[in-house]
Image (spheres, helix red, strand yellow):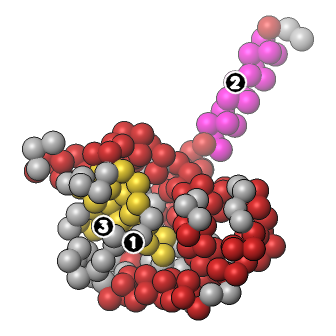
């Protein structure tokens, strides 16, 4: 192959790759804008930390942190999956114990029929002190949210399977998820993911910079 043919071929490959990248970016932007536009019609109230007890919710970071980030999530939501795989690790790496990060269930059962069971399963993992590990595997899995996969993930991360399966059938555990749903609905939340950064609301799977701006402003307001 002559050098000219080589460079022409390389140029075509690079051009094709750039075209694919541009299409992907436009698609991603369109998804976010459609999501935000759909949910902006429903005003969301600020999170009342006195009214809603989140002390027994899965938490990362320091309990005494001046900035609390509350995530309302649905395990069948593609926006939640993308956020948890790409943005959340950066937030945790950047801020560590400077923030308190809290997870609240909000399965959109009217459009995601498997999401409720997945939330219950995550609560069962929480009872065995493995919530965040189970959650990571749940979002990373491409095998769906059917019972077989929920059990497989639990076994994979070494949970007590008798305890886990008993928990899945527990009305008390299901009530925890129901309570989280009621909290979300009382706040006017209609989609996932939705975030409360102290008294500020952020809707949708937004880029890291959106979270950084809001978290930094909150930290600065407390002199941190």
Q: Earlier in the sequence, mark 3 or mark 2?
A: 2
Is residue 138 within the magenta segment?
Answer: no
Circle 2 — which element? helix
Residue drawn at x 49%, y 70% as measured from the top left: 73
Tag 3 residue: 196
Q: Which mark is residue 11?
A: 2
Q: Which residues are magenta?
A: 4-20
Q: Residues within 10 Å of mark 2 (few under 14, many from 20)?
A: few
Residue drawn at x 41%, y 60% as measured from the top left: 59
- Residue 153 in percent (x, y) is at 73, 62
Which one is in front, 202 or 27?
202
Q: Which mark is residue 56?
A: 1
Circle 1 — which element? loop
- Residue 119 in percent (x, y) is at 58, 76
Which one is in front, 200 or 117?
117
Magenta stretch: helix, strand or loop mostly: helix
Q: Is residue 36 visible?
A: no
Residue drawn at x 89%, y 11% as measured from the top left: 1
């Amino acid at each position: 192959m002559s050098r000219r043919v080589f460079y022409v071929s390389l140029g075509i490959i690079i051009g094709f790759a750039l075209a694919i990248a541009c299409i992907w970016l436009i698609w991603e932007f369109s998804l976010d804008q459609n999501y935000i536009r759909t949910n902006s019609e429903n005003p969301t109230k600020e999170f009342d930390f006195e009214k809603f007890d989140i002390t027994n919710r899965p938490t990362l970071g320091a309990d005494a942190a001046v900035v609390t980030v509350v995530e309302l999530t649905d395990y069948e939501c593609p926006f939640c999956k993308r956020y948890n795989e790409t943005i959340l690790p950066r937030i945790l790496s950047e801020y560590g114990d400077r923030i308190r990060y809290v997870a609240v269930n909000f399965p959109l059962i009217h459009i995601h029929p498997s999401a409720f069971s997945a939330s219950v399963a995550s609560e069962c993992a929480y009872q065995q002190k493995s919530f965040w590990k189970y959650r990571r595997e749940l979002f990373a899995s491409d095998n769906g949210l059917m019972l077989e996969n929920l059990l497989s993930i639990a076994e994979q991360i070494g949970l007590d399977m008798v305890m886990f399966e008993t928990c899945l059938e527990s009305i008390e555990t299901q009530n925890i998820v129901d309570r989280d749903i009621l909290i979300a609905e009382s706040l006017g939340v209609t989609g996932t993911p939705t975030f409360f950064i102290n008294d500020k609301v952020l809707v949708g799977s937004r880029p890291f910079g959106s979270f950084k701006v809001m978290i930094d402003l909150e930290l600065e307001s407390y002199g941190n």
